[in-house]
Image: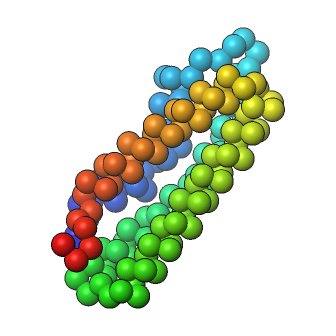
């Protein structure tokens, strides 16, 4: 299986820019909240890049082993995906708490909704490009 280069670029692309552009266009902060929010968000984006690197490695490993997939290698890939997804959710939860505490609950809710939508769209795009194992 070969994953189109544009999909790998989308996974690896400048995550900070993509997220920042969408967040800036969508979030509605009250006066005085911006400084605190954007500082927290910059920290969050730095940590997201580490998770994205793991996902990129997982997709590469899937592509490399796709034609010779065994039960064991498929199980390993699945467990790695669960680990990455758990890290992503944990990070989102952690930063939801930070935004809620420092900026407010409404801003935290917006952060959560926007980030969740970004991840869903990226995940959908990736899922549409990867064929089902053994299919």
Q: Residue at x 52, y 32 (%)?
A: 114
- Could you say where residue 116 lies in the image, as x and y percent from the top left? 51, 40
Residue 33 appears left or right of 83? right
- Could you say where residue 107 lies in the image, as x and y percent from the top left? 67, 25
Name, please, the residue furthest toward the left.
Answer: 135
Residue 113 appears left or right of 96? left
Q: Is residue 17 above or below residue 14?
A: above
Q: Is residue 89 above or below residue 98?
A: below
**132 vs 121, nearest the viewer:** 132
Residue 92 appears left or right of 124? right
Residue 67, visible in the rendered structure: yes
Residue 43, visible in the rendered structure: no
Instruction: Please count the marks in the image.
Output: 0
Q: Residue at x 65, y 18 (%)?
A: 29
**14 vs 76, nearest the viewer:** 76
The quadrant where residue 36 appears: top right
Query: From the image, which quarter does the C terminus lie in?
Result: bottom left
- Could you say where residue 57 lies in the image, as x and y percent from the top left? 45, 70
Query: From the image, which quarter does the N terminus lie in?
Result: bottom left
- Could you say where residue 99 lies in the image, as x and y percent from the top left? 73, 33
């Amino acid at each position: 299986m070969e994953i189109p280069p544009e999909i790998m670029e989308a996974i690896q692309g400048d995550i900070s820019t993509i997220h920042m552009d969408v967040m800036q266009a969508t979030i509605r902060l009250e006066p005085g909240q911006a400084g605190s929010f954007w500082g927290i968000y910059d920290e969050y984006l730095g940590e997201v890049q580490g998770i994205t690197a793991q996902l990129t490695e997982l997709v590469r490993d899937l592509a490399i082993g796709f034609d010779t997939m065994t039960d064991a290698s498929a199980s390993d890939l699945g467990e790695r995906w669960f680990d990455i997804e758990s890290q992503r959710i944990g990070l989102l939860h952690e930063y939801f708490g930070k935004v809620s505490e420092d900026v407010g609950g409404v801003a935290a809710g917006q952060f959560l909704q926007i980030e969740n939508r970004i991840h869903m769209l990226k995940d959908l795009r990736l899922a549409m490009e990867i064929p089902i194992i053994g299919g």
